[in-house]
Image: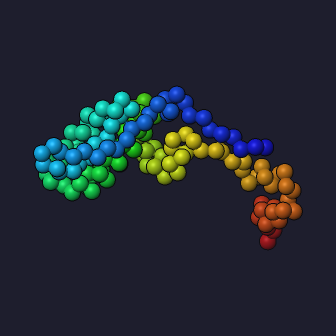
């Protein structure tokens, strides 16, 4: 059996947010923002990052928050959720989603056959420990 390629839904394929460096005119102060797929700053993220800048947080801190918030808002968009109504379960799902490799999160992962499938086609002699470990031991 060949590997199965996961194809993202239209919703997943369309969510393309990005973190963008911003240099303040006149002062040359550096900050960061998150742009939505429409290339417009994501308003709630922009407000929070603006607050961090106003209390003089390091640009590196603001950049780190920008990347984390991009991930959060991308996750919410993929699931059709609004940030104002996110639940504890949504946060738990987000944490699990973050543990996936980035390619998996973006829907570009290739799903590989399982070990059991491979063992079935290769024969148990190729995996003697797997067969032995599945047989209950008598005392």
Identify the image quadrant of the N terminus: top right
Residue closer to the observer: 15 or 87: 15
Residue closer to the observer: 69 or 80: 69
Work out which residue is located at the far bottom of the displayed protein and give it: 139
Whether residue 106 sits left or right of residue 34 in the image: it is right
Q: Is residue 2 visible to us here?
A: yes
Residue closer to the observer: 134 or 91: 91
- Number of numbered callouts drawn: 0
Name which residue lies at 27% across and 56% down. 60
Q: Is residue 88 visible to us here?
A: no
Where residue 57 appears, as percent x and y from the top left, is 19, 55
Where residue 90 appears, as percent x and y from the top left, is 41, 40
Q: Is residue 133 above or below residue 6?
A: below
Q: Is residue 113 above or below residue 139?
A: above
Where residue 98 appears, as percent x and y from the top left, is 46, 49
Where residue 96 appears, as percent x and y from the top left, is 48, 48
Colour mode?
rainbow
Whether residue 97 sits left or right of residue 61 in the image: it is right
Whether residue 73 sits left or right of residue 122 in the image: it is left
Name which residue lies at 43% across and 36% down. 16
Name which residue lies at 60% across and 35% down. 7
Name which residue lies at 56% across and 34% down. 8
Whether residue 121 sits left or right of residue 115 in the image: it is right
Identify the image quadrant of the C terminus: bottom right
Q: Quadrant of residue 49?
A: top left
């Amino acid at each position: 059996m060949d590997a199965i390629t996961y194809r993202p839904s239209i919703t997943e394929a369309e969510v393309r947010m990005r973190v963008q460096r911003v240099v303040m005119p006149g002062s040359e102060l550096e900050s960061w923002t998150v742009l939505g797929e429409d290339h417009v700053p994501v308003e709630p993220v922009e407000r929070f990052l603006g607050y961090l800048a106003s209390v003089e947080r390091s640009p590196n801190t603001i950049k780190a928050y920008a990347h984390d918030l991009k991930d959060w808002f991308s996750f919410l968009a993929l699931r059709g959720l609004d940030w104002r109504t996110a639940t504890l379960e949504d946060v738990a799902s987000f944490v699990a989603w973050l543990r996936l490799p980035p390619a998996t999160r973006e829907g570009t992962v290739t799903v590989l056959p399982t070990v059991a499938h491979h063992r079935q086609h290769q024969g148990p002699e190729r995996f003697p420990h797997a067969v032995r470990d599945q047989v209950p031991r008598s005392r």
